[in-house]
Image (cartoon, helix red, strand yellow):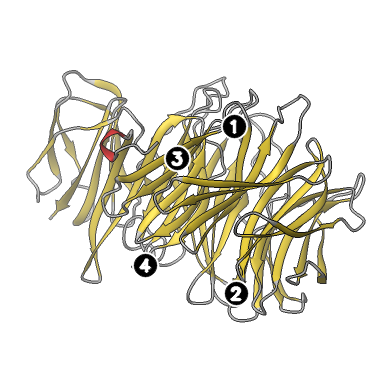
Amino acid sequence: MIIPACKVRHALFFILFYANGVMAQTGSWAYDYTYFDRGMMMEIQSGNILVNAQTYSLKGTNGIIYNLLIDPEKGEVVLENTTEKDSTFYQLDRGLINYNGLYYNSGGVGDYTVGGPGRTNMMINVFDENLMHVELFSFQDSTLTSMGRDVSTRNSFLYLWGQSGVGFTPVFNVLVCMDTLGNIQWYKRYKDDYQFVSSCFIENSHDNNFITTSMGQRYQEKKTIVVRKIDTLGVTIWKRDLGLSNSDDNSCLARLGSDKYLVTTYKDTVYNSPNDEVISIPNWMFVLNEDGQIVRDTILDAPARRRYNKAISTQDGGALLVGYFILPFSQVAIMTKFDSLGHVQWDRYYRDNDFSQVSGTNDYYFAGGFFDAEVLPDGRIAACGMVTDSFTNGANNIWLVVLDSVGCWMPGCADGLQNTIITHVTQGQERLPLTIFPNPGNGLVNISSSLEDTDPNGMIEVFDQQGRLSWQEKGIKPSQTIDLTNLHSGMYTLRLMTKTGFAVEKIIIE
């Protein structure tokens, strides 16, 4: 069913600014207030942003598949389509590609239930430019439970990279070749000497073959990331084991320059409580050449471990990676840009400053992270993911962020690490009428809002042009005066946030 944009539940906050004489627009947008799973992917359609996501349930069905087409200039939903598979397990994963006017994403479909019997098959879900469901292709690997992880195209064929095994224990990596009508041409399994495997990504190589990543583990040993080059008939050309490091099974992959590849991995560690110490766990970056040799490797250290969820190649031969920092019961979205040699060009992290912590509980603010990114035709960067306000209520919003070409929420963060504050507006919040005077002024600012009563938990915040928090005060009155005379002259952004509404205005201090 297609839902007109006027009926779609969404909220919006966009900022307009001038950069290098050109008006640019950035924004943060959240859709719905339900349990969206992390399988969120993006594509670009005629300058609009296509977000593909799903709701999630543990009761035998994975809910509803959402296809949302969003105008990046206004943040409005242009078109929406939903697909539901009557009480059938239906899960999207990481693949979403556009090929000859159709969109293909990967995942699994079947009768599988968590903790119960059943089996899933690898699948490719197909929908058209109107976001209408066209077809569903599925592949059954013997009697095993299978899941599609990523999909690629080559010469009118679809190549589905996935895994199969028993329950939650994958044993084989599987590559399936099918035509665009879903007819299986061939499939091959890849296992080597690992007892446990999990596929990650597949990418077209520079020499018209395929590069894949997967995680392998031998019994009672640490996990390792395996990079494999495969030809178009499924034959392994070479395989590179990046070493036993207890790596997670989310190793990202992107092409660099004309003959190299960037592969990322990080250690898999679980925090048991919010009071656990934040340990700096390094993230490994490997640059491989066309023959699978490691050209260089480096470690990205950080205040907490990084988990990259997706890597995309950029027009300058580099790569853009998105994901999140993992903290005890909290996450912060990250974005890192690499050049064509695998060196970091810039590194940003993003958080919603509207967080709270409840002492003695696990109801900590959970700022989600990014799961996919695309570069818009005008050079701006769009990233999608999810945000959630706590671990206990199980509700996630789809989070879409539009940034400038160097990952800035506000201009001026071109160098170094930038902590960028992003406003997250959830369903139910409205923009409040706000009067600020004098503006420009000397820093004594009178604020008049539409609030009827004082909100003791409301927050007034002021950010500089680099997005840094310059001043804040808790407690909002219908009318009040704030003193910003200690701030330097210049332009600032004033933000007022309450439980029911928000307001954002530019102010100038002379």
Going from N to C along the chain, the mark reached first, 1 or 2, is 1
Quadrant for residue 344, please give it.
Answer: bottom right
Q: Give how far apart the Cα atoms at labels 1 and 4 are.
A: 33 Å
| Left or right of residue 209, residue 380 in this image | left
Q: Which residue is mark 4?
A: 377
Disc marking residue 398: 3
| Left or right of residue 388, residue 485 in this image | left
Name the one closer to the observer, 277 or 386: 386
| Left or right of residue 241, residue 336 in this image | left
Quadrant for residue 201, please give it.
Answer: bottom right
Q: Decide: is 201 above or below 351.
A: below
Going from N to C along the chain, the mark reached first, 2 or 3, is 2
Kind of residue indicated by mark 3: Ile
Q: Secondary structure at mark 1?
A: loop
Q: Secondary structure at mark 2?
A: strand
Q: Position of residue 293 (x, y in %)?
A: 77, 76
